[in-house]
Amino acid sequence: MSQTFGQPFIVEGKPGRQRPARRATQVARAPNDGYTLFLARCRMRRMWRLTPASATDLAKELPTPIALVATVPSILVVHPSLGVANVQELIALAKAKPDQLFFGSVGVGSPPHLAGELFAVMAGVKLRARAPRRGSGQAATDLIAGRISMVFSPASTIAPHITAGSVKALAAATAKRASLLPDLPTIAGGGLRRAFDSGIWGGLMAPAGTRRAR
């Protein structure tokens, strides 16, 4: 942005993975002069969602979405010991073993948690969410160690482990194939046969009432 607009932009990082609603509120209450912006992680397709509490905490003070900045594809990966080669076989295994397959989560309402629950509903299976982890990297570690059976992980996080053979990738959990793993089918094309997209969006937001650039 500094290169595009020819002026400095100050990036202020706020610690605390479970506190984005509070940080969004700070932006929403800032002067709507265009000098304060918020880079939000948008969870799931067509959702501007910051945390599970956002709908309540920010119902009247939501920052205004400006533009899509980036998209991160999600990949469905499983532990090799499951012995499944595709999404169709995973669904069959989950139906044969209801409530016996654990999927990774990095917090209630997080992208991996929502993706896992969505998959279970659409596939008609019963899965169990593992206790929330500290992040996608830890979820990948748990999968490699066999503490969970599957996880929906950002492609950038899980790709090295797929290459190393530590985990098995079944499908891209997006509407289109992931550019990082172009040979991998989508979940819809791999056996679910229904549109499925749990990609993560990164969006830029501003206080409500901020005027458009002229």
Image (tube, rainbow, N blue to C red):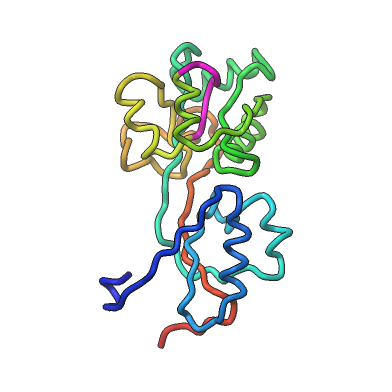
Q: State the image coordinates of residue 205 (x, y, percent, origin top left).
A: 51, 68
- In this view, the residue in front, 65 or 130, is 130
Provide the residue span drawn in magenta: 145-152
- Residue found at x 48% / y 74%: 36
Residue 100 on the magenta span:
no
In the rendered image, the quadrant that contains the C terminus is bottom left
Above or below, 33 against 188 in this view is: below
In-image side of 212 versus 177 (left or right): right
- Residue found at x 50% / y 25%: 87
Give the quadrant of residue 164. top left
Give the quadrant of residue 169. top left
- Residue found at x 55% / y 81%: 32
Q: State the image coordinates of residue 145 (x, y, percent, origin top left).
A: 47, 17
Q: State the image coordinates of residue 166 (x, y, percent, origin top left).
A: 37, 19
Q: State the image coordinates of residue 77 (x, y, percent, origin top left).
A: 46, 27
Above or below, 211 against 189 in this view is: below
Give the quadrant of residue 68. bottom left
Above or below, 72 against 126 in this view is: below
Above or below, 210 against 196 in this view is: below
